[in-house]
């Protein structure tokens, strides 16, 4: 699942990501693209049992890959 959150104001990107996590299948990963690095999201992901990898893209956006632990 890919969520393009560019152009959305906080907290909309984080809310969209958290809603997608509730619908996520076990082996599915979520790829979110944000204008900003989602610093407040990381603790929430950890608490809910998800791992993530964030990379900054050439256009300045951030790509966050999210998967369930284990």
Image: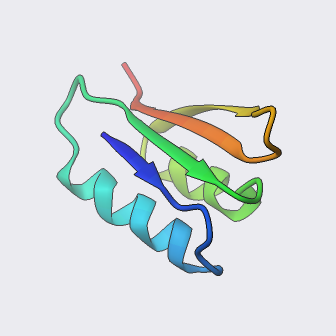
Q: Quadrant of the N terminus?
A: top left
Q: Residue furthest top?
A: 70
Front residue of 40/58: it is: 58
Q: Is residue 14 left or right of residue 21?
A: right
Q: Residue at x 53, y 61 (%)?
A: 5
Dividing the picture into quadrants, the one containing residue 19 is bottom left
Residue 16: x, y in percent? 41, 67
Q: Give the quadrant of the C terminus.
A: top left
| Residue found at x 76% / y 59% | 36
Question: Where in the figure is residue 32, as x and y percent of width and height?
Answer: 50, 46
In the image, residue 25 lies at what x, y percent?
17, 36
Q: Which quadrant of the structure image shows residue 62?
A: top right
Total tally of numbered discs in the picture: 0
Q: Residue at x 32, y 52 (%)?
A: 21
Determine the residue positioned at 64% across, 81% down: 9
Of residue 33 and residue 51, the one placed in the foreground of this image is 33
**How far across and how far down the image is residue 7, in percent?**
62, 71
Furthest-front residue in view? Answer: 59
Judge whether 25 appears above or below 47 on screen.
above
Decide if residue 12 is on the left or right side of residue 28: right
Q: Using the image as rendered, state which of residue 38 and residue 3 is in the foreground.
A: 3
From the viewer's perspective, tell me whether residue 11 is left or right of residue 2. right
Q: Is residue 53 above or below residue 10?
A: above
């Amino acid at each position: 699942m890919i969520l393009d959150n560019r152009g959305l104001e906080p907290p909309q990107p984080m809310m969209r990501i958290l809603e997608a996590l509730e619908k996520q299948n076990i082996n599915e990963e979520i790829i979110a693209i944000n204008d900003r690095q989602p610093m407040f999201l990381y603790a929430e992901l950890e608490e809910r049992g998800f791992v993530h990898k964030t990379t900054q893209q050439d256009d300045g956006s951030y790509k966050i890959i999210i998967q369930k632990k284990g």
